[in-house]
Image (spheres, grey):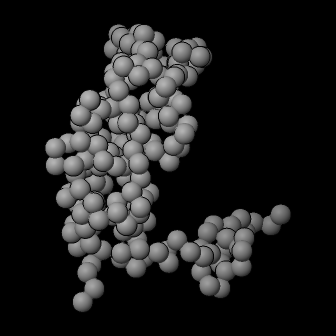
Amino acid sequence: MKQSPEAITQATPVGEVYQLLGGNEPVAVRETDSLRRLAELALERPETRVLAVVDDDRRLVGLVPVRLLVNDIFLKVVPEEFLGVIADIDDVLEYASHVAARTAGDIMKPPVGVKTFQTVRDAFETMHKARLNGLPVLDDESRLIGYVDQLELLLAWMLATGREPLLMPKDDAEPGDAKAAGGETDDSPG
């Protein structure tokens, strides 16, 4: 008997999906690494959307989402773009902290990850709550061993549930035919 999509999501361990997908190598950084170093590493691994800040034992101590890194660097280059959104004292304090930031430790968020025994559903929930597009994969002692992102988990789930045809054009659609593929078209006279 085929499992329901919900059962697959609730029963499939992240470790299984991680191995199935070939295991993405995480981007590990130290709290003392410069923002420039983080940017260089992020450019080397554009598929990784969250950098893992680790200690000497590779235990997760924080995260740097790439979007946060980009915003922080952008703030230093063109601060006038951010000045218009400062509305109160909390915004001023946050702005000041970002202007002063120079290392991963200055901008990192609290550590959030997923262990190999946790389920795909756990990973999706953790990403959603933490507002992240990806998560470090951790061993039982919270040491960094991998990385998974939302798209990878979603594709693995679609394959496991047999829903991958939802990503394919319909058989009767011609390439570029939005109407036959279920897309919207402008039917108004030209």
User: Where residue 114 sits in the image (x, y, percent)?
Assistant: 25, 49
Seen at 20% across and 42% down, the residue is: 142
User: Where residue 86 sits in the image (x, y, percent)?
Assistant: 45, 15
What is the quadrant of the N terminus in the image? bottom left
What is the quadrant of the C terminus in the image? bottom right
Asked whether 110 or 125 is in front, the reply is 110
- Which quadrant of the view contains residue 159? bottom left
Asked whether 50 or 175 is in front, the reply is 50
Q: Residue furthest right?
A: 190
Q: Residue furthest front?
A: 56
Up-down relation of residue 144 to residue 13 (above or below): above
Seen at 45% across and 42% down, the residue is: 49
User: Where residue 66 sits in the image (x, y, percent)?
Assistant: 46, 35
- Which quadrant of the view contains residue 104? top left
- Which quadrant of the view contains residue 160? bottom left
Asked whether 23 or 17 is in front, the reply is 23
Asked whether 77 or 31 is in front, the reply is 31
